[in-house]
Amino acid sequence: MSFFDVTSSGKIINRFAHDFSTIDMQLPFALVVIFLNSMTNIMQIGFCVAATPYFLILIVPLFGCYYYLSAYYLLSSREIKRLDSAARSPMYAHFGETLNGLVTIRGFDDMNRFSMQATLLLDQSQQVLYLTNTTQLWLGVMLQLLNSIITTFVALMAVLQRNSASAGLFAILLNQISGFMNEIETLMTSICNLETTIVSVEHVKEYSELVPEAPYEIPDSKMGKSWPKHGQIEFQNYSTRYREGLEPVLSSVNLSICAGEHIGIVGRTGAGKSSVNMALFRIIEATDGKILIDGVDTSTLGLQELRSCLTIIPQDPFLFEATIRANLDPFDQHQDADIWAALDAASLKQYVSSLPNGLHQQVNNGGENMSLGQRQLVNLARAMLNKNTKVLCLDEATAAIDIETDNAIQRALRKSFTGCTVLTIAHRINTILDSDRILVLERGEVAEFDKPAVLLANQNSIFYSLVNSHDD
Ligand SMILES: Nc1ncnc2c1ncn2[C@@H]1O[C@H](COP(=O)(O)OP(=O)(O)OP(=O)(O)O)[C@@H](O)[C@H]1O
C-alpha cells in the first residue's frame, strides 16, 4: 500500500499507457530499421571501397564525426524523453481526478477552471514535444552538413583523378554516397530512438521489481477453514508504521482481547484507531512484536487466508460497479432469502424493494448513485451475510447514518454477531458505551484499557473527558 501512498495515479496510468505503447509500437520498429539499415550501409561501404580505395581515408573521420554527433544528441534526447514522461503524468492525473469528481465540479459550477487547467497541462506536455522535434531537426541539419562536406570531398577527388578514373565511375560513386548518407541518417535517428524508447523499458522494469506484499497463499498451510474458532486476539509488544522513515503509528502495544468480547476503540484524531485494523489485516506490517489470533501468529499466514477470515466495515465504504446482489455476495455463495434477511437487518430492505430492479439494480462505480449512508449500509449488509466470521472490525461504520438508523443497526449487529469478537471504532461515543471494554489510544500507545464503568468512575481518565466533551 505504501507504493500507492507515494505514487500518483497519473504516474501509474502513464506507465501503463505511454510506456507500454512505446515498447509495443516503437521498439520493435526501431530494431527492424536498425538491422535493415546496417545491412544496407555495409553493402554500400563495400561498393564504394571497391570503386575507389581512397574512400577508406574518409571512413575513420566520418565515423568519428557520427559518433560525436550521436553522443551529443543522445545526451539531450534522453533527458527530453524523461521530461516528456514527467510532463504527461500531471495531465493523466488531472484527467482521472476530473472524471472522479465530475458531479462535484458540476455542482460547484467550476467546469471552466478544470477545463482551463486541462488545456494548460496539455500545453505543458506538448511543449516537450516541441523540444523533441527541434533536437531531431538539429540532428538532421548536422548530418546534412556532413553529407555536403563528404560529397564535396568526393567531387574534389573526381577532379584530381580526372585523368585516371572514368567520369561514369565517379557519377555512380556520388550517387551511392548520397544514398549512403540518407541511410546513415535514418540509422542514427533509429539508434537514438532506440535509446530513448529504452527509457520506457527502464520505467516498466522499475515497476516489475517493486517489492510485493507478503505471499497470498502459504503452501501446506494447516489452518483450514475453521480458523479462527474463537476470535481471541492478542497484541504482543506490537509496533508498526506506514512506511520506512516515518514515525511508528502504533508503539509497543500489549493487549489481550478475549473471544467474543466487544471492544470500543476511542482516541483523538490521528491517535492510531484505524491503524489497529490496518495491522490486523496486515495492510501494514509489524516493525516489532506480533499479533496472535487464537494463538496463531498472523504474520505466518498467507494474506488471502488471513483476510478472508476477518470481516471489516471500513471508514470509506467500497462498492463495485455491479448489481446490488453482486455487491453483497460477490462470490455468489448465498441464497436470495439470506440476502434479503441481511438487507432487512441493515435497514435497507425497504429501499432495495422500492428500486425498479430490486436486487439486480445496477450500482455505479464506487456507489456514486447511492448516498454515503446507503453505501455504509450495503457494506454492513455484506458483513452480516458472512455469518461464519469470528472477528469483526467496524471503523466508524455508521458515521454517515442518522441516529435512529444507527441505533437500529447497533441492535442488529449485536444480534447478528453474537459470539463474535467485535472491535468498534466509534464516531458516536454512546454507541460503544455498552462495550465489554474500552481501548483508549493516545499517539499510538495504549493509554487506557478497561470496562467503561471503571473508566467513567475515574474523572481523570481520558475516556471520561472524551465522553463529557461529546455530551457538550
Ligand atoms: N497512509 C498513511 N501513510 C502515512 N501515514 C498515515 C497513513 N494513514 C494514517 N497515517 C498516520 O498515522 C497516524 C494514525 O492514523 P489513524 O488513521 O490510525 O488515526 P485515527 O485515530 O484512526 O484517526 P481518525 O479518527 O481521524 O480516523 C496519523 O498520524 C496519520 O497521519
Image (cartoon, rainbow, N blue to C red):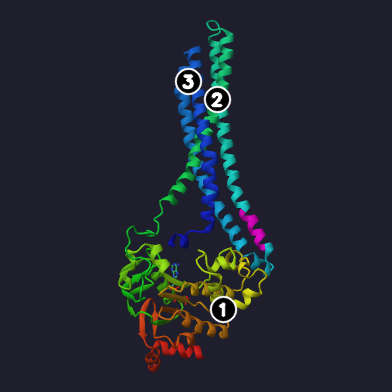
Checking the image for residue 58, the label placed there is 3
Mark 2 CB in 8 Å range of ligand 1?
no
The correct choice, above or below, for 182 with respect to 223 in the image is above
Q: Earlier in the sequence, mark 3 or mark 2?
A: 3
Q: Quadrant of residue 289?
A: bottom left
State the separation of the CA atoms marked 3 and 2.
13 Å
Q: Main secondary structure of the magenta part?
A: helix
411 sits to left or right of 240: right
Q: Does residue 182 show up? A: yes
Residue 259 forms part of the magenta stretch: no
What span is colored magenta in the figure?
113-121
Q: Nearer the viewer, mark 1 or mark 3?
A: 1
Q: Ligand 1: give its quadrant.
A: bottom left
Q: Earlier in the sequence, mark 2 or mark 1?
A: 2
The correct choice, above or below, for 292 with respect to 46 in the image is below
Checking the image for residue 47, the label placed there is none
329 sits to left or right of 225: right
Checking the image for residue 344, the label placed there is 1
Q: Which residue is mark 2?
A: 181
Q: Nearer the viewer, residue 99 or 144?
A: 99
Q: Secondary structure at mark 2?
A: helix
Category of crowding for the residue at label 3, using alpha-carbon neighbours closer than 10 angstroms: few (below 14), some (14–19), many (at least 20): few
Residue 308 lies, in percent from the top left, at 42, 66
